[in-house]
Every structure is written in structure tokens, then in C-alpha cells.
Amino acid sequence: MAKLCALATMALAMLCIGPRAIAQSAPSERSEVDTPSATRVHHIDEYTQAAILRYPGLKAAEADIDAAQARLAEAKLSPFFQFEGQARFFVAPGAEGTPTFSPDPQIPWSNRWGPGGELGIEGGIPIYTFGKYRAGKKAARAGITASEYEKDRTLNRVVFDVRRAYFGVQLSLDLQAMISEGKDKLRRTVEKLRERLDADDPRVKQTDYFRMVAALSEIESRESEALRLEASGRAALEVLSGIEPATVPECPLEAVQSEVIELGEHIERAAESRPEIHQLEAAQSAKDANLTVKRAGYLPDIILALAASFARTPVITDINNPFIIDRGNFAGAFVGLVARWKLDFAGTSARVKAAKAEIASLKAKTEEAKQGIEIEVNALYEQLQDAKRRLGSWTRSEKEARKWFVSAAQGYEVGTMDAREFVDAITAYFTARSNRLMATAEYNLAIAGLEKATNMPLVSEQGWRPVDCLE
């Protein structure tokens, strides 16, 4: 019996979300759940859609996409608006004179002071930047692509977490039903043994009573664990989906019907569709653009420069002569081609080397990611095949072990079997049943994991519901 309980605990403990333990699956002979009749039952696809609509990580990803799109708009337009404006208002001492003579000193402090003002604007429009402008737009587009695939990653993660929590609640309920069945039979047996011992029945051994009480106590403790794990699974569903209370349908646990293909095709799908790979490709594009910008640092930017300014100070005589600088009264404009050149060639050389190293590093990380994805898909595929084989084996074992269990229970009641044989039959049946539930849960989780790992659907949205599940 201890082996049975350990297996049940392992099945529940392996299904965890964050700090919470989550479980998985639900049986046909499950006991009634303490749920109000008015509470609506929700299926796995309903929980999934609700979680997608409210999950904060997806909202954050959408905001990141908006920010990346804004950066692209900036990269397209900002280079053509590199102008600076200036407005000054001041007071200055008055001055008089002509272009050839003035009675006032250099700074006529004692003259009457008066207000003045100046307006000016200057800047340039890029004509040719040797690739910097195009590279900036390319990097910004890569940022949008990376943000979009980050949203896909988040979506895959939340969908998988909902499925894991959902199957977790179902498995917890299945295990509770299994434990309840064994507990009730053992409790009745213990009561009968106690009565027979009190009546000094010579056919009853004290050790038989101790064996039954120990088995019953072990089952009751495991039932408490299953209740705790069910509660944590429901809490995870409620947090993810916002649906309260999280009530799952009373349906038997079944393996989902899926489109499982050959391992090699799964690996190819993952390499082509996995968001992480596309994010790395977008990062590669951004790094290439960065290298273009660094290399262009050796060359100047050709700019159409524009400048205009106007100043007026009434207390200063306006010397209307283009060859004389009048600091209080002037107007001017300039248009011309300018080559703006940053002559930090040593720094540019270092920046180019760094950009090349970053590209080499990113290529290596991309290869590392592809290897990791291949390993992950391989492990999930083998987990799926293992669960499938064990599911078939334990399903057959459960049918035969149940016959033994029923026969042993009847035999023990009429006295043709002893307590040890009865406990062995209970252990065999519930071990087979627990393992069948565990294998079914692992199979479904492996399918969900393969969908997440390949970013390709293997089950239709409605296909996650059991075939014979009633509404």
C-alpha cells in the first residue's frame, strides 16, 4: 500500500506551476465534488481563452509591440527633423552711431537700457549617410519582429500553464476517488476486525488488525495531500483565467486525440516555428544593422544645412550694413551642403570589432538554442511514447487487478483469504489504477508540451475536451 501511495504522490508532485503543486485528470467513478449546483462548469478551452484575454504578460507584450512600432516611426522620421530653435529676450544699454563713427564706448553702461529679442533656428536634413539611415530602420523593424515573437512565447506559456493546471485538478479528483474507494473498504474491514477481536474470535489475528489500520492511516494521509493539491490546482486556474470558482467537468480522464507525427518532423517544425529562433534571427538582423552603422562611422554624413536668425534691440542704432556685425539688430539665413565627420577613427575601429564579435556571439547562441530545442523536442517525444506504452500496459493491468481485488474482498469476508492476501490485492489494483491515471496525465501533458515546443497545434481546440464528456 505504501508503494501505491508513493506513486500517487509522485504523480501529483510532478505537476507544478510556480510554487504551487498542480495535479492532473478525472475518473468515471469519481465521487461528487462539493460544488453548488448553480456553479457553472468550464472546459479547458474556456479556461484557456479566459486566461489569454486577461493574462498580464500578454498585455505587456502588446505594449512592447506598440513601443517597437513607435521606435520604427522615430527611425523613419526623426533624422529629417534634427532642427533646434532658440528664443532670447534681454535688456541691453543703448548705443548710437554710424558705420564709421559712434560717440559711445565699447560698453556704454551709462546709456539708457532697453529690451531686445532674438529668434533663431538651425539644423539639417540628411542627404546621404552611407547606410546609417537604412540600418536604423532595419534595426527598428527587427525590434518589432522580436516583440511579436515574444508575445507568441508568452501565449504558448500561458496556454501550457492552463492545461497543466486543468489536468492537475482532474487528476487530483481522480486520485481522491480512487483513494476513497479503497479507504471505505478498508474502514469497513477494520471495523469488522475490531468487533471480532473484541469477541475473542480465534480466527482473527491481532497482526491482521494492525496491518489494516496501518494501511487505512496511510491512505487517509495521502487523501489529505490530494485535497491540498486539488485546492492549489483550482487556485492556479482561478488566478490564470479569472474564473471563480474554478470548476471542472465530471468527466473520466482520457488521452487526447492528437496528430502525432515522426520525431524528425517535430524537430523540423520546432526549428521553423519556434518563437525563440525567430527572435534570435531578428536580433541577428539588428546586429547586422548595428555593424553597418559602426562601419559608416569612418565616413561623413552629407547634410543639407539650414539656419536663420533675427534680432531686434530698439535702443541700439540699427547699422544696416551686411559687412558690419550689429549685435543688437540683425537678420540672416544660410543654406548649404555640409559634410559632418566624426574623426574618432580609433574608437570607430574598436566599435566595429565589438559589433563583429556580437554577431559571432549571437550566431553561436542561435546554434546553441537550436540544439537545446532539438533536445527538448526529443525528450518530450520520448516522454509521449513512454506514456503511451505505459498507458496501454497499465490499462490491461487495471482490468485484471480489479478482478483480483473484488475476488479477494469477497474471499476475505467469507474467510477464505487472510488479511495479507487482501492487502496485496488492494495494492495491486490501486497501483495499476494509479499508474494508468498517471500515464494518461503524462501523455496529455507531453502533447501539450510538444505543442509548446514546436509552436504548432497537434490537437484541435475542442479536441482537448474528452470525447464522451457531457456538457
Image: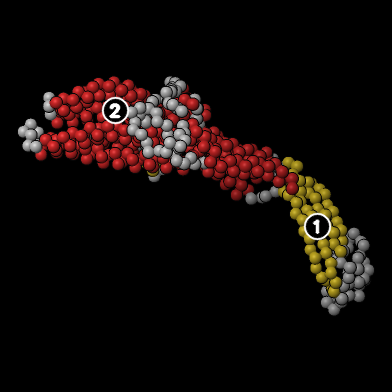
Mark 1, Cα crowd under 10 Å, few <14 / some 14-19 / many 20+, is some
Q: Name the side, left or right, on which 339 lies relative to 265.
A: right
Nearest the viewer among 421 and 86 is 421
* Quadrant of residue 127 within the rendered picture: top right
Quarter of the image where one finds residue 180: top left
Quick check: can you spot residue 375?
no
Q: Amino acid at mark 2?
A: Arg
- Give the residue type at disc 1: Gly
Q: Secondary structure at mark 1?
A: strand
Q: Residue 183's quadrant in the figure?
A: top left
* Residue toward you, 371 or 2: 2
Q: Residue at x 90, y 59 (%)?
A: 322
Which-is-in-front pick, marks 2 and 1? Answer: 2
Q: Position of residue 173 (x, y in %)?
A: 35, 34
For this rendering, which residue is in front, 411 or 224?
411
Say which residue label 1 marks: 120
| CA gap, disc 2 and disc 1 | 85 Å
Relative to 29, 99 lies left or right: right
Secondary structure beneath disc 2? Answer: helix
Within-10-Å neighbours for mark 2: few <14, some 14–19, many 20+: many
Tell me residue 50's x, y (percent). 51, 37
- Percent x, y for residue 79? 71, 45
What's the coloring here? Answer: secondary structure
Q: Which residue is mark 2?
A: 433
Q: Which badge, 2 or 1, comes first in the chain's sequence?
A: 1
- Residue 261, above or below 165: above
